[in-house]
Image (spheres, helix red, strand yellow):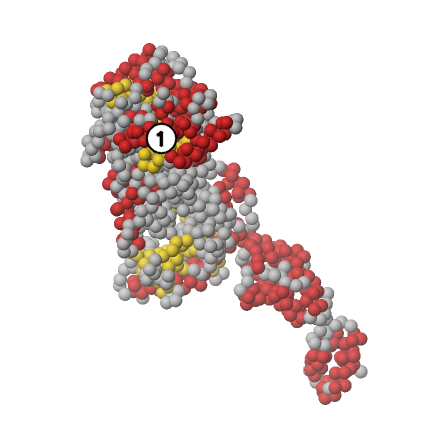
Amino acid sequence: MAQYEAVIGLEVHVELKTNTKIFCHSGTEFGADPNHHVCPVCLGLPGVLPVVNKKVVEHAIKAGLALNCQIAAFSKFDRKNYYYPDLPKNYQISQYDLPIAEHGCLEINVNGADKRIGITRVHMEEDAGKLVHQGTISTTPYSLVDYNRTGVPLIEIVSEPDMRSADEAVAYLEKLKAIIQYTGVSDCKMQEGSLRCDANISVRPVGQAELGTKAEIKNMNSFKALHKAVSYEIERQIEVLEDGEKVVQETRTWDEAQGETLSMRSKEEAHDYRYFPDPDLAPMVIARDWVEEIRAGLPELPDERRERFVSAYSLPEYDATVLTGTRELADYYEQCVELYNNPKLVSNWVMGDLARMMNISGQEIKNVRISPAQLAKMLELLDNGTISGKIAKTVFEEMFNTGKDPGQVIEEKELVQISDAGLIDKVVVEVIAANPKSVEDYRAGKEKAIGFLVGQVMKLTKGKANPGLVNELLKIKLDK
Amino acid sequence: MQLHYLTAHQLHDMLVSKQISAEELTRAVFDRIEQVEEKIRAYVTLTQERALNYARLVDKARLAGEALPLMAGIPVAIKDNMCTKGVRTTCASKILYNYIPPYNATVIERLNEARTVMVGKTNLDEFAMGSSCENSAFFTTCNPWDTNRVPGGSSGGSAAAVAAGETILALGSDTGGSIRQPASFCGVVGMKPTYGAVSRYGLVAYASSLDQIGPFARDVTDCAMLLNVICGHDPLDSTSVPYDVPDYTAFLTGDVKGVKIGVPREYMGEGIDPAVKEVIKKAIDVYTGLGVVVEETTLPHTEYALPAYYLIAPAEASSNLARYDGVRYGYRAKDAGDLVDMFMQTRSEGFGAEVKRRIMLGTYALSAGYYDAYYNKALKVRTLIKTDFDRAFEQFDLLLGPTAPVTSFKRGEKVDDPLQMYMVDICTLAVNLAGIPAISIPAGIVDNLPVGLQLIGRPFGEGDILRAAHAFEQNTDYHCKLPE
Ligand SMILES: [Zn+2]
């Protein structure tokens, strides 16, 4: 049996975060009532004209620079012509042969190996609206259209066919998402559709230079779906070839429920989009000093920040990678370290208890109620012995759930560690009196018996006694 | 005294001196409409109540001593492809027969600020595609000089309305000659400004890179005054050019001594009616007499203007008109089975033959495999045509020739022969491809039909064109001739 190699390229649509749409002044806010964010321009009424939102071009340039692209000196918009009711003009304003950015790349790391994935182009375009059916599209008696999203600015980022596995595809998309999020030009929320991904997949025998016939896979709405769909499609195409048949060039859709890709349309049925330059929008001359100004304003990007975390905080590579996964998480971490200078301990808490609680509650870092300052304060209290390590976990959970200060939680729940030797001594005396058997065992040389006695003291103090002090005081009494 | 046949600048003086009121003027125009509209059929929609209300407001303001703009109270007719808030805008198409825009075109906003009075919306060839008004889905407008003949097109309604005294001024749009050719046929002044001089926002697009709104008037002074109102940068139109709009009436000095005018031999060759040629030769004599240097010149790529135009304009139209699908507004086919059915039936029933012809032509020109051979080649020709003009303007201040190769033809004469119809625009098309300004002014009468003289200028050279046009007018009386 021949060995096969998959060749994967991704086309990623990213919704840009702007107050207004790409060609008009309508708002872009997600979740408004249907047809609320519309005006004559984005509804494509007779006679209207588009005027490009400069912020969109700036964002696209920013994304292009973050992806190591060359920014075009001369760029233009084109019309992509096709009929669909969610497209009010029956053409989409997009970019065809002169995209805003080209020839970029990003680095991924899969199983410890670094790999560079090429980025062919980044171009700007307008989003379409949304059809609302009763039931399914094939049985609905009529469909309604919501044009809120029509004209929301998008960039499409097209990769080179440089990926060879589902893992690499996911790593690429994760990295792309992180980079775009770092630049602040998009939220990249797959659930809300502000990050969408299509995959071009082909397979070929290992060693063959020529590319196999590709299929385009659509409708993958999560990283998991991307991984499953790509894996499935690779297997499917290998099977087709193994059966001595040919892969058909077509568009396929990922069916999440069935866990398989299904044919949507063949190459013959593909649209002829009749691209041509949009005569309503003058071509853009992109001033070099503007590009440099945008470049100068770029924030530190994930790779740089990871390297800095390793060198400046002496963090392990793994910690640095996780912590710099999103700009918000990295910011959170750094704000905390600034207030509590023990980078590794902060990292343990952020990657440990914080990540665990976020996971359980399904929250994102920016919505977390416990602030970096509160976490730093709690770590200080742990440090100075006000609370024990065990109690800290309880305090942390309460802080996470309520957003209260650690001091308040400790007070309300009476969780202050008892470090008063007099108080503990009283309990120690009680415990020794009540457990003559264990005392005897200990004195007979069974040193382990002290563990039981410590446990008893902790129990009576509701876990608040300073464990070190308990041990010490018990030993003094028992060794007499 | 026939108010409806006076010029805007005459009427302005009478309004200011309170000899007449704006309401009286508006009533006079509507009386005239009452009298002749049955024969002319210039208007798709009349807005009499609205007009009288506007006029009364102007009178009230004047009585109150308010400072009013120059054009306050002057009636203006609007070609029915410019959006008017609350007033039906049909493009003379079945597909928009019931469409009422929720916004005003920028030119309408400017006319409102100038306190002009809109008379109504004038007839045109459907979506401005045609040269005779016979492509209107509703009815054909007649030429006031001979009602058996066409007024020209596509802005035939506006031209006929001005010629027949059914308005004082009008706006048209010119994509390949749609203002100048009907102006020539109807014996009025019509000007296509430089591409980018007047905002296209709210002008229902036919061919976006060629469309330009411009004035119709009875004389050059009125034309300059209306141009003053509508020109200027508009942030809502990315193709509108930021430039300092001069006072165009300031160019009307009568002095053209030493001006150099070129006469492209291509505009005086075969295919031009000899009688039309004679009129142009006489016009040249008038200019020579005024101290103008007139010489023959050449625009070598002129013969390619028509094929280039009929690829570029339909290509853009095929995309611009895609939005008329029955989903959101306008005509929707009844009893369509499914979505694709609805699209196809709506468009089959809603568009007329010429519109469909151009949509098909344009769709073909942009198709995969044909794009380079047709659309792209047409763009290259367009560049060559621009270069022709650039070269000519290195030597000359203006170019001169006939506006149309013929005078108005009979209704029905060319409807079955699209190519013959297209040929009527051979003198005007190249100007749109080059994006430069040009005017048509009355220059003679042949067999009781007016003949237009075209003057073409440099980009944003409207002032020079108007100066020369005005000088001609000062020394001739063709602009005073009225249809019977
Ligand atoms: Zn809008």
Amino acid type, residue under disc 1 in the picture = Phe
Front-most of residues A132 and B396: A132
How many dots with numbers?
1
Residue at the spot 37% in from the left edge and 59% down from the top edge: A133
Q: Which residue is mark 1?
A: B30
A121 vs B321, left or right, is: right
Residue at the spot 30% in from the left edge and 13% down from the top edge: B285
Q: Chain of mark 1?
A: B
Front-most of residues A252 and B46: B46
Front-most of residues A87 and A242: A87
Residue B49 location (% of width, % of height) = 40, 36
Q: Is residue B391 visible?
A: no
Q: Is residue B221 above or below residue B336?
A: above
In the rendered image, which quarter contains the N terminus of chain B?
top left
Residue A391 location (% of width, % of height) = 67, 71
Residue at the spot 48% in from the left edge and 44% down from the top edge: A25
Which type of secondary structure does the marked residue at label 1 adopt?
A: helix
Q: Is residue B484 visible?
A: yes
Front-most of residues B230 and B102: B102
B77 vs A394, left or right, is: left
B302 vs B224, left or right, is: left
